[in-house]
Amino acid sequence: TLSAFDGEAKNIPPYPGPNRMRDCYCTVNLDQEEVFRTKIVEKSLCPFYGEDFYCEIPRSFRHLSFYIFDRDVFRRDSSIGKVAVKKEDLQKYHGKDTWFQLQPVSADSEVQGKVHLELRLSEVITDSGVINHKLATRVLECQGLPIVNGQCDPYAAVSLLGPSRSEAKKTKVKRKTNNPQYEEVFYFEVTRPLSHTKRQFDVEEEDVDKLALRVDLWNASNLKFGDEFLGGVRVPLRVLGQAGVHDAWYFLQPRENGGKSVKVEELGSLRLNIVYTEDHVFPSEHYTPLRDLLLHSANVEPVSASTAHVLGEVCREKQEAAIPLVRLFLHYGKIVPFISAIAHAEVNRTQDPNTIFRGNSLTSKCIDETMKLAGMHYLQVTLKPIIDEICTEHKSCEIDPVKLKESENLDTNRENLRHYVDRIFNVITTSGVRCPTVMCDIFFSLRESAATRFQVDQDVRYTAVSSFIFLRFFAPAILSPNLFHLRPHHPDPATSRTLTLISKTIQTLGSLAKSKSANFKESYMAAFYDYFNEQKYADAVKNFLDLISTSGKWDQKSIETPIMLKEGFMIKRAQGRNRFGMKNFKKRWFRLTNHEFTYHKTKGECALCSIPIENILAVERLEEESFKMKNMFQVIQPERALYIQANNCVEARDWIDILTKVSQCNRKRLSTYHPSAYLNGHWLCCKLSADTAPGCTPCTGGLPANIQLDVDGDRETERIYSLFSTYMTKLIKMQEACGSKSVYDGPEQEEYSSFVIDDPQETYKILKQIVSAVQTLEQQHTKYKRDKFKKTKIGSQEHPIGDKSFQCYIRQQSESSTYSI
């Protein structure tokens, strides 16, 4: 998993023109594939982004890269610089705010992929009886080459380098593939007699070890600028050793700079916070002790002594603990009792009803995470239509007289803003029936705990719920719709300003504060809020809060209104519904609801094809070799399969996940499928000729699950183990704090004051069990790593030789030679 916080850039070089300012945005790339893009910050050389990006990484990669681009209205956006971090170096920057110097972007440095080579040195006796040495170089294949300007037609140039030679030979060009198969052999004469008059077999080269083989991959371009460099490798012939044979995979490397100096300090710098996690998940039985401790947390008295609460105490950030805890408890159906227990304990510790749930406690973070997971589709059906309308209409809503443009009218803008606020307020306060049951159960628990604790304050039962549903759910979604999947991209600056003003007003309406105008620092906002100083707004909020905090009253499955789950442009292959129709690829607008999956010529037009959800039998990836296209998947129906290409690997995974979840309860779901396409009268995977032949590969879809969540419980337990392992010193210190509290009744020692310990003896007992379970898993991980290291073969397809691993390869080869002797 990857979590990246894109903070800000500074000292971007000015634009070479009279304006000098730039409109910059930043992209996040896995190798060269863009998976995320920030908003555009206009007219700035020190743009501030402040955006979080989180994703599950669906494939292997070598570099995590961040590019700064300057938007150009008339031409292609130009790249200013980049930050590229190798996968093995990500741990150096884990969780740290780091300033990275921007590096220049050049075609010679933008490489990815790997190549498989086989070298063989042999002796050849000529007709005259002279022994020559010849090198046979076999270029077998490449994988994962970059796609340049939408196409990849690669060929390899092979040359033998030495003090006095440079011979070059080329493979054939392989069209429309970034995984070319070459299987071509080239011969190079390595040693020759110094003179035909000499009888000794002296050679022109003093030593074969001085020679090297160079393999460069190029994209055959039809453009006048020439072929594009895709990457290369340099293989010293000393790898041949005594055996004279070398067979290995190599990572492609950038082209050497040739001694040119680049003033990188002139490109500026970028501040990032990167968190990259790799989970090595064992079979389920390995996690039983730790998982049982966690799932028992809601039943522990006091709850502050429970394993889940202890995790929140030792983690640096509560969010770290909340994410895996919520996913684990949701998976096992125990989220409501757990949150109810920790919320009840927090309410009892709160002295002022006005500060209830206002801090970043474990309770607050867990409820936030639950709403994100369980309430995402609730947000879609409630807010998406009106948010889309606001982003499309571009009505001016600026009510700050200082920011008002000359052509704008303040009264008109106020009326536009009031109209939008009214509509959003109405759709929210009438959406109670759609609120997911798990959220209603949690809100019921919060309401009961708050009302019991502060019986004098009649409004606390409302503010306890509104502090989450309005302040932490609806308001942030209105403010940043792209982060909640309500919009595919960032709104433009003017629309973003409109959404900010709406979000502020909705947040204040939902807070039910005694003094409304005091909530606004800006006088123009306080004046605008006078429009809403009517009792009907407060009554509507209270009715809505009453409805969503009534436990178990509403069932989301009974809602018949179609809920829009996901939409966006993708490329699809014609399904061949017309017997003589062309099966070509076309860009279409896809739309998924809980009723049907449709595609349209463009957004807003009538559907060209509609697939009822009950007709989706499976959703699986499609092997790249089927159409020589990446990021493809198939939606399998009773009579045919729809082949679709997503824009990138993350988006492909998202579509597969949501389509699988929404169709998992279908009665006729398949158990097997064909991973390749049906072309030219047969399936490419199993070669069967009947288009109705049963699948040859088991489907990957799991058991029926809630549409809103697909969780691997073992993986979440593994993440929690990793956190406990990381913060083991804090666990030990917490044990010491329990011991100190048990024997000492005086003032609490400062080093232990950060821990919440209500029952030292019970907490110590649980801590001891946690440490034991973590240490057991630690031993299993150590054994796994040791065994994996022994089995690792550098130069294999899984572990190609890179710029840093070459010496390891030489050492590994010498060790194996010594062992065999």
Image (cartoon, helix red, strand yellow):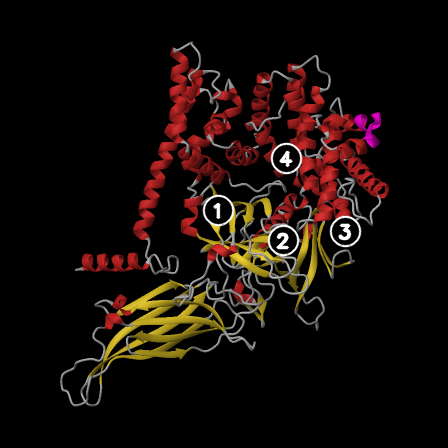
**Circle 1 SS class:** strand
Q: Residue at x 55, y 28 (%)?
A: 362
- The earlier-in-sequence mark between 3 and 4 is 4
**Circle 3 SS class:** helix
Query: What residue does disc 2 label?
Result: 617
Tell me which amino acid carries mark 1: Trp
Point out the residue furthest to the top here.
745
Query: What residue does disc 1 label?
Result: 99
Query: What residue does disc 4 label?
Result: 371
**Circle 2 SS class:** loop
Query: What residue does disc 3 label?
Result: 392
Q: Is residue 197 left or right of residue 783?
A: left
Residue 799 percent across, percent down from the top left: 37, 57
Tell me which amino acid carries mark 4: Met
- The earlier-in-sequence mark between 4 and 1 is 1
Tell me which amino acid carries mark 2: Leu
Disc 1 packing (10 Å; few <14; some 14–19; many ≥20):
some
* Vertical order, 429 against 279 (above or below): above
